[in-house]
Image (spheres, rainbow, N blue to C red):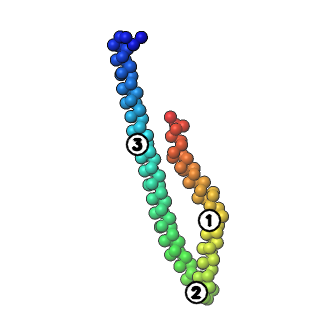
Amino acid sequence: MFANDKSIDTLTSLYKEIKRYVELQGQYIKLDLVEKLTILLSTLILILLMIILCMTAFFYFSFMLVYVLADYIGSIIASYAIIGALVLLIAGIIYYYRKPLIFQPMVNFLAKLFLDEQHKK
């Protein structure tokens, strides 16, 4: 069955092609992983920068509200207490709705990033 040289050459070339295919698939998986990790890291950096900028703006706006309320209430201490209570209320609301506000969008983004590519092929 394998007596002639043509069969042996065919099997040898088939082995080389399979080996090359496996190597190329490995390189493709590495490139795909690097692409997805780059998208993930750039998105996380963007979100981190947006959070820092929004927190800075929130900080300044809260001080502005303290001084505006101080004119109406008559006490700067009471206006600080009101703004502090509002910040704690907002933090409690965000904590209560953490799954739909934070976890679910993150899971959807990661699932879309890592799993949707397989369905497109």
Viewer-side residue, 25 vs 52: 25
| Residue 30 position (above or below residue 72) | above
Q: CA distance from mark 2 to mark 3?
A: 58 Å
Left or right, residue 60 beside residue 91 = left
Left or right, residue 64 beside residue 10 = right
| Mark 3 surroundings: few (<14), some (14-19) or many (≥20) residues within 10 A | few
Q: Is residue 5 visible?
A: yes
Whole-percent x, y for residue 71 in the image: 59, 86
First along the sequence among labels 1 and 2? 2
| Residue 116 position (above or below residue 54) | above
Whole-percent x, y for residue 22 in the image: 41, 32
Give yes or no for contact between labels 2 and 3 (Cβ–Cβ under 8 Å): no
Q: Residue at x 35, y 10 (%)?
A: 4
Q: Which mark is residue 94?
A: 1
Residue 97: image quadrant is bottom right
Viewer-side residue, 24 vs 66: 24
Q: Is residue 71 visible?
A: no
Residue ID for mark 3: 31
Q: Secondary structure at mark 3?
A: helix
Whole-percent x, y for residue 2 in the image: 39, 13
Amino acid type, label 1: Ile
Residue ID for mark 2: 76
Q: Residue at x 33, y 13 (%)?
A: 5
